Each structure stands twice: as C-alpha cells, then as structure tokens.
Amino acid sequence: MTITVALIHMRLKPLAKKSNLEKARKLVRDAALKGANLAVLPSFVNTGPFFLYYPRTRNQSIARNQAERIPGSTYEYLSMMAIENGIYIVAGPIVERAGPKMFLTTLIIMPNGALLAKYRKIAPNIVDEDIGISPGREIVVFNDAGRAMGLLAEDDIYYPEIARALLLSGATAMIATLRPGEDVNKVKLSLLARSIENRVPILAVGGAFETVENVIDIPTMVIDPQNGIVEEINEPKDTFLLVEVMDKPSNMKEIIEASLKAKTISTILCKAAKESLVENLVAKFRSGENTA
C-alpha cells in the first residue's frame, strides 16, 4: 500500500492562534485535493515558537497561559480539519497542560476527527526546561494510515536511543518535527545518522517563525537511508511537500540482529575505555602523581 504524506511548511507568527490555524487549514485542504492521505503540521502550529521572540523572564508565564488540555481548542480545530478533508493529521508539539505539569505534545488525529494518540516529547532542551516543560515517558508508533510511523519531536532527533526504540517497536518510517532556529547542519547530520543507522526514511517538517525584526527558519526535508536528503524546502513561505511512502513490512529478525550487534560493539568500547582509564591511573600512581 502507498500513502501520500503532505509535509506542511508554514510561516508562523507568535501567539497568533487564529491566523496560524486558518493558514494550516488552507494548506491541508490544498494538500488533500492533491491526494494526501496524511498531513504533518509543524511544531507550535498554533502559537508559533513564542519563546524565540519574547524575553526569557516572560516565557514561563506565557507558556502556562497558552497551554491547553487535550482535548482542547487546538485539538477541536484540527479535528474539524481532519473530518472536512478525510485525512489523518499529525500536529505538534504544542504546549499541553496535564494537572500541574506541562508537556510538548504531538497529536495524531484520525479522518473521523478522533484522537488516535498523543506523543509527549521525551527530550526537552534547556529552553523547554526553563519554561517548565516536563519530559514524556513513552514512544509512539502508529500504523493506522497504512505504514508503521514512529514520532520524533524536535530534540528527540539527537538521541539514537529514541529512534532505535521506535524501530524495535515496529516503525518502518519516522516523522520528525523540527524547531526553527536550530543549527541546520547539526539537524541534517542527526537526521541522516538516525535514518542510516535504523535503515528507515525520515520525513522531517520544519518551517519559519516570523517576528517584527526577522524570520527564523529550518528546512523541511525527506531523508532516505540510501540517498540522503532527497527533497528539501528551504524557504520561509507557506507551502507543502507531497511524499509517496510505500508500505514496507518490518523485518524484526534484521532489527534484532542489528540491535544485538550494536549492544556488543557498545560493550567492547566501554570495556576498552575502562581498561584505558585504569592503565592511566596505574601509570600515574607508579610515577608518584596524585590521583585523587
């Protein structure tokens, strides 16, 4: 089975929920008319990454004011978009409030508008922690759209363990959402590494963030484990990229063998590092140096 995924590349404004979501609705509609079965919306599709614009001292209070329970108003709007276009929607992360905690949460919405799953970003960065974001604890792989897709949110791409956990849970492709303002070379190298080491394609949605002073952006990309970055949008404009993704059954035997090999290599390297450290300490002790 082949599914057509629309990677929605948007120019977002700070705290402009209504206009940001209306723009997303138009782009999703246009993508659905061209045959998209699933649309992936960018990080902070409702509020824009506001913390890149407002002073650090205000960001925590803004985050608490903008945080939504799920279901909430943004979910309801995205649910309507899914229903009117008969399309799956992956959107986020957005700021979620759950009791006293806040998470950065990606929503997966079915064509009938129901919430299929939500994924809380596992690897918050320093900025996230500064505004009070808590880490998620569970990975998400969904296959209702026709292929087993694993979710990565922003800084998750820097952690090989998260992508490998998705692979071991059956993911045959991964969807990543990227944050504007990140080092583009670092992002590209990380995506390439995650794709190659897990032998899966990665569909990465970037976008742009517009302020009064400037525009901060990050590319939208399609990464193939054999051919690297095969498609890219690198402009601060509203558009989308259609990607046809063919179903590929997960080869669990190959995955398990690769994991065991990686574990063995890791053990050998750790042992070598430990032995080297011990040898250095012994040499210093024998030479009369202080090893405390």
Image (cartoon, helix red, strand yellow):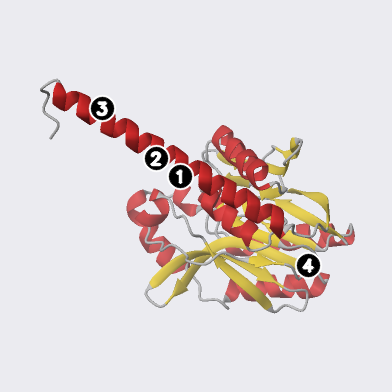
Q: Is label 2 in contact with label 4 (beta carbons under 8 Å)?
A: no
- Residue 145, labelled with which disc? 4
The answer to whether 101 appears left or right of 140 in the picture is left
**Tag 4 secondary structure:** loop
Pick the residue in front: 39 or 244: 244
The answer to whether 13 appears left or right of 136 in the picture is right
Q: How many marks?
A: 4
- Residue 271, labelled with which disc? 2
| Quarter of the picture holding the N terminus | bottom right
Q: Is label 1 in contact with label 2 (beta carbons under 8 Å)?
A: yes
Q: Which tag, 2 or 4, sits closer to the chain's start?
A: 4
Asked whether the viewer can see residue 173, the reply is no
As shown in the figure, which amino acid type bears the numbered disc 1?
Thr
- Residue 267, labelled with which disc? 1
Query: Which residue matches tag 3?
Result: 280
Pick the residue in front: 267 or 227: 267
Pick the residue in front: 160 or 136: 160
Q: Which tag, 2 or 3, sits closer to the chain's start?
A: 2
Residue drawn 69% across the image and 63% down it: 22
**Tag 3 secondary structure:** helix
Q: Is residue 89 above or below residue 195?
A: below
Q: Position of residue 261 (x, y in %)?
A: 58, 46
As shown in the figure, which amino acid type bears the numbered disc 4?
Ala
